[in-house]
Amino acid sequence: MNRREPLKQAEVLKKLGKTCVIDAFKHREPHVIACYVLQYEKPVLIDPGPQSGVHDVVEELKRLKVEPEVIALTHVHLDHAGGAATLAKYLSAKVVVHPRGAKHVVNPTRLWEASRGVLRELADVFGKPDSLEEDRVMITEDCQELDLGEDELVALHAPGHAPHMQVYYLKDAKVLFPADAVGIGFDGHLIPSTPPPFDYDKALRTLERLRKLKAESVALTHFGLTDKEAIERAKDKIKEWYEMAASCRDVDELIERLLRSDEDVNALYKRYPEGSVLINFFRASVQGIFKCVKGV
């Protein structure tokens, strides 16, 4: 699968327009976790990032002189939503979330315990989420539109990566915010994001739904802007990994085969050290694909 050249900064600024990228994990690993600020009449922040990055996000919001009224979550995983409650209290903002994720925003105890079981030490690096009053949480319906003033942000339920996943589509600007539905992008490369409990069939249906949108730009949480072709690339790569996993004895064999045959995986290991966030995410993705194939 051919690598795409990453967009230059000037191209990114032109395509994003009124949307600003904040590096929500720059204190630890820069250019790994992005949150997006939609600087419209009714400003919205998409995925504030982990609890440990809240200070960075707050400082950048001060610099931008913007106070989002809404924090829109794609899902409640720690790297995307861990800082949501803390930031919502600071901004006096509402938190928008998929109906299946709302309880974890109100009381993150079970989410935290499950996250520590999967992420281990990385969960502590991201930080434990705060709880939030239930009346500050707004549950979405599929295709629900959020009025920004000069544009509309559409929430689309998008299971696969997680059952409580949703993506956002900025209608007039034609920018898609797919979080992990499209995967992890770096230096023009793309890695699927398929941790347990990954649902292969739902993930492919979600990607097909996203492909039919009129998006001109795709703004990834991990990390930055890419083009719409990334959606089809993600679909193809998930299929490749799934087929490869079917003939592997265990996760280690699948990783070894991907290192031999997948250009993007090779680039990942050359770019990031063992123990880094994206290497951890890759390993979790391989486990998710393998468990999905083997039915475990």
Image: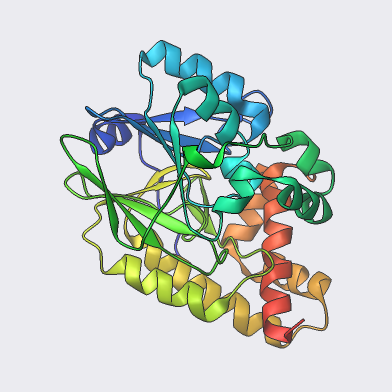
Residue 29, horizontal then vertical, whole percent: 66, 31
Residue 73, horizontal then vertical, whole percent: 48, 46
Task: Indicate left or right for 151 with 120 as reference.
Answer: left
Q: Vertically, is 196 above or below 155?
A: below
Residue 7, horizontal then vertical, whole percent: 36, 41
Task: Kindly identify the residue that appears in the image at 74 percent across and 36 percent down.
Answer: 128
Q: Would residue 123 be visible to someone looking at this image? A: yes
Q: Vertically, is 223 above or below 168?
A: above
Q: Going by the picture, which residue comes out furthest to the bottom?
A: 247
Quadrant assignment, res 36 = top left
- In the rendered view of the protein, which quadrant contains the C terminus? bottom right
Task: Indicate left or right for 213 with 120 as reference.
Answer: left
Comparing 103 with 218, the one in front is 103
Q: Vertically, is 259 above or below 29?
A: below
Task: Kindly identify the residue that appears in the image at 48 percent across and 37 percent down.
Answer: 136
Task: Indicate left or right for 104 with 180 as reference.
Answer: right
Q: Going by the picture, which residue comes out furthest to the front?
A: 135
Comparing 75 with 275, the one in front is 75
Q: Would residue 1 be visible to someone looking at this image? A: no
Comparing 131 with 187, the one in front is 131
- Numbered circles on residues, count: 0
Quadrant assignment, res 283 = bottom right
- In the rendered view, how is the structure colored? rainbow
Comparing 109 with 12, the one in front is 109
Residue 231, horizontal then vertical, whole percent: 39, 64
